[in-house]
Amino acid sequence: MKKYFKWVCIILIVVVACFIYAHIDKMHAIFDEDVDPSLYVGSDVQSREEFEQKFVSEEEALDGIALKFNITGENIEKVTLVYEIADESGKTIRSGELSGDKFQNQKYNKLSFDRISDSKSKEFIFKCHVENNDEANGISFLKENDTLVMKYYMSRFDLETFIIAVALCLYVIVFMKILFKMFKE
């Protein structure tokens, strides 16, 4: 009985840990991910132009946008990225800004905002521009065929991640059990 209780506890701990691990930011790319990243085109660092990107959501809700760009300069702290999400009519739903000290070069920078519910199959317009940039310090937005290199995401439980994590943990446990039996003799 004690032996079974130990295994039930181990399996329960594994399932709970995998359940926690499976709560992720599920990303959906707006651009063509099959294109070689070396073909991305960057915008002018000094540009104060507003970039606009339309997209249709595949998720029930939106929790943020992940935008990829290049950083130029050493004093990037004063540069600010200002963004907003509008519905198909152009009405601003969410807005915010990201300060330069939080920028990550050549990585997806998450722009989080309050959840937008009931967004499945709805069109949104993402607008962004840079403030306080100059010729030495700024960011260059990456584009692929006139589409910003960006993803939208929803924070949620992902069943696929959960199943893979549980299967991997069980595989390791069974493998270790077999190894102990082999070398115990």
Image (cartoon, helix red, strand yellow):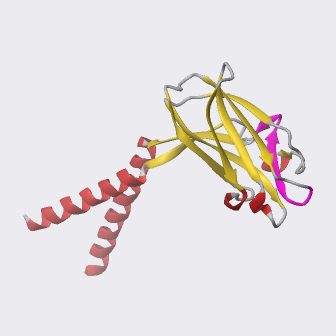
Horizontal arrangement in the rendering, residue 164 relative to residue 39 (left or right) = left
Q: Can residue 34 be seen in this view?
A: yes
Measured from the top left, where is residue 155 in percent x and y? 48, 43
- Asked whether 173 or 178 is in front, the reply is 173
Decide: is 84 above or below 175.
Answer: above
Residue at 69% over, 46% down: 67
**Which residue is rendered at x = 65% and y = 33% of the image?**
85
Q: Quadrant of residue 102?
A: bottom right
Up the image or down, 20 lies above or below 48; here it is: below
Residue 166 shows up from this direction = no
Residue in view at x 25 percent, y 58 percent? 11
Toward the right, the furthest residue is 135
- Main SS of the magenta part reads strand
Q: Quadrant of the N terminus?
A: bottom left
Q: Is residue 172 left or right of residue 82?
A: left
Looking at the picture, how far across and down is residue 36, in whole percent?
79, 46
Of the 4 image quadrants, the one containing the C terminus is bottom left
The image quarter containing residue 135 is: bottom right
What residue is shown at x 65% (from left), y 24% (from top)? 91
Work out which residue is located at the far top of the displayed protein and give it. 89
| Residue nearest the viewer, comparing 108 with 118 | 118
The residue range painted magenta reads 135-148
State the count of labels: 0
Q: Does the magenta stretch include residue 139?
A: yes
Q: Residue 74 magenta-drawn?
A: no
Q: Where is residue 168 in the image (x, y as percent from the top left)?
A: 41, 57
